[in-house]
Image (cartoon, rainbow, N blue to C red):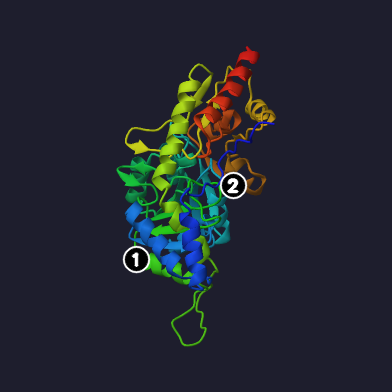
């Protein structure tokens, strides 16, 4: 059987940077949750992103949860959240007892539609926070979204879990809103096995998040707690992996973009539309994603199954939050008669974008796709 081609799997550095930092932690006995690796990983990310206030955490979801707390979101509040996303973008809204209102996508970037955001404000009033997602690494239309949030003084939370290295308005994604969230899950562009970071505009928010992430212990000689805390800090071992991965981040972005370019060149004759990179923004193309044209006789499931038969991993786009059973009662705001997010889900496919793929691997994927469309004619 031919080698398996993954969608996006962990990719350690060839020089073993990660092991060096892990071994150093073992030699120094810094196996506990905090240590030099955590501090240096935060410092490296500050230098890379330009963010001044960063807290390394156990997951991107933890970062989202803490950002909502820092933004003052609580029981009975409303949070406007992008509809087309992974559930981790929306779940923390329920952790704090707030109500999610889902905002439809626009066709260009597949991210939050600024017109739908404005419509939601007109209909439901000013929310306590807005969560925008940079889907598959592709920046949302932040310039317009930021203008709306600034007008109404709404805290903007950037879910940049998939967008480390992507840029919008000349700045790194995750550093533009009041809060930014990064993820280092195993499938992300760099990984710490599991982990995330919270980026804060205000130093006070970062200090509060750090306190909450370490069980909200007060500065007393005994254990005193005046608010509910969480065990959300990143471990020193995981951070060692992250320090090593930072050495190859630029290379990984270049590899993702090269994979995307090769797909576009090889599949230009197929009835597919690629997720568009907007002028003034740069995507890391974490996952190359396509829409099958409406007049095609091929469905996403058929394409994914055809790839699977050749030992190749593909995936549907995220199922919109408003269509998830757990959010069946949630509100959706769209400017179209039919939700754009529904259309994207029903026609979209994520293609394998693993940075260990060779050009021949990309061609192998393309050959399966081209053969499928040819047979469907």
Residue 52, percent across and down? 33, 60
Which residue is found at the position 38% from the left and 56% from the top?
45
Which residue is found at the position 53% from the left and 44% from the top?
102
Extreme-bottom residue of the structure: 221
- Is residue 66 at all visible to an observer of this figure? no
Residue 16, percent across and down? 48, 53
Which residue is found at the position 57% from the left and 36% from the top?
317
Mark 1 element type: helix
Which of labels 2 and 1 is toward the front?
1
The residue identified by callout 2 is 330
Using the image, determine if residue 362 lies above or below residue 330. Answer: above
Residue 321, percent across and down? 58, 43
Extreme-top residue of the structure: 377
Using the image, determine if residue 171 lies above or below residue 197. Answer: above
Instruction: Say which mark, if any, is on residue 162.
Output: none
**Image quadrant assignment for residue 325:** top right
Instruction: Say which mark, if any, is on residue 203.
Output: 1
- Is residue 254 at all visible to an observer of this figure? yes
Mark 2 element type: loop
User: Could you classify mark 1 by the number of other residues whose Cα lies within 10 Å: few (under 14), some (14-19), or many (20 or more)?
Assistant: few
Residue 101, percent across and down? 53, 47
């Amino acid at each position: 059987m031919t080698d398996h081609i993954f969608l996006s799997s962990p990719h350690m550095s060839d020089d073993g940077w990660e092991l060096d930092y892990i071994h150093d932690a073992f030699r120094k006995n810094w196996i506990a949750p905090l240590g030099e690796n955590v501090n240096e990983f935060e410092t490296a990310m500050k230098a890379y992103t330009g963010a001044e206030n960063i807290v390394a955490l156990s997951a991107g979801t933890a970062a989202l949860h803490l950002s909502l707390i820092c933004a003052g979101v609580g029981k009975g509040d409303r949070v406007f959240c992008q509809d087309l996303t992974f559930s981790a973008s929306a779940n923390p809204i329920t952790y704090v007892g707030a109500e999610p209102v889902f905002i439809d996508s626009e066709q260009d970037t597949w991210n939050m539609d600024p017109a739908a955001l404005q419509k939601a404000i007109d209909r439901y009033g000013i929310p306590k926070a807005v969560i925008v997602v940079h889907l598959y690494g592709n920046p949302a239309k932040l310039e317009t979204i930021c203008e709306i949030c600034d007008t109404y003084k709404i805290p903007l939370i950037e879910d940049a879990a998939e967008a480390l290295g992507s840029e919008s308005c000349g700045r790194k994604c995750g550093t533009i809103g009041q809060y930014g969230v990064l993820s280092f899950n195993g499938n992300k562009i760099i990984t710490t096995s599991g982990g995330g970071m919270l980026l804060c505009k205000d130093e006070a928010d970062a200090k509060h998040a750090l306190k909450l992430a370490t069980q909200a212990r007060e500065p007393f000689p005994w254990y005193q707690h005046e608010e509910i805390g969480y065990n959300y800090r990143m471990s020193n071992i995981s951070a060692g992996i992250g320090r090593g991965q930072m050495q190859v981040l630029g290379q990984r972005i270049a590899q993702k973009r090269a994979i995307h370019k090769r797909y576009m060149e090889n599949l230009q004759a197929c009835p597919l539309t690629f997720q568009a990179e907007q002028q003034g923004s740069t995507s890391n193309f974490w996952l190359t994603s396509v829409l099958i044209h409406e007049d095609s006789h091929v469905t996403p499931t058929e394409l994914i199954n055809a790839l699977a038969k050749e030992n190749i991993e593909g995936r549907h786009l995220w199922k919109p939050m408003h269509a998830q059973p757990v959010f069946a009662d949630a509100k959706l705001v769209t400017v179209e008669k039919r939700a754009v997010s529904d259309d994207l889900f029903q026609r979209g496919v994520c293609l394998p974008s693993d940075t260990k793929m060779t050009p021949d691997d990309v061609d192998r994927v393309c050959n399966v796709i081209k053969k499928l469309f040819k047979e469907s004619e």
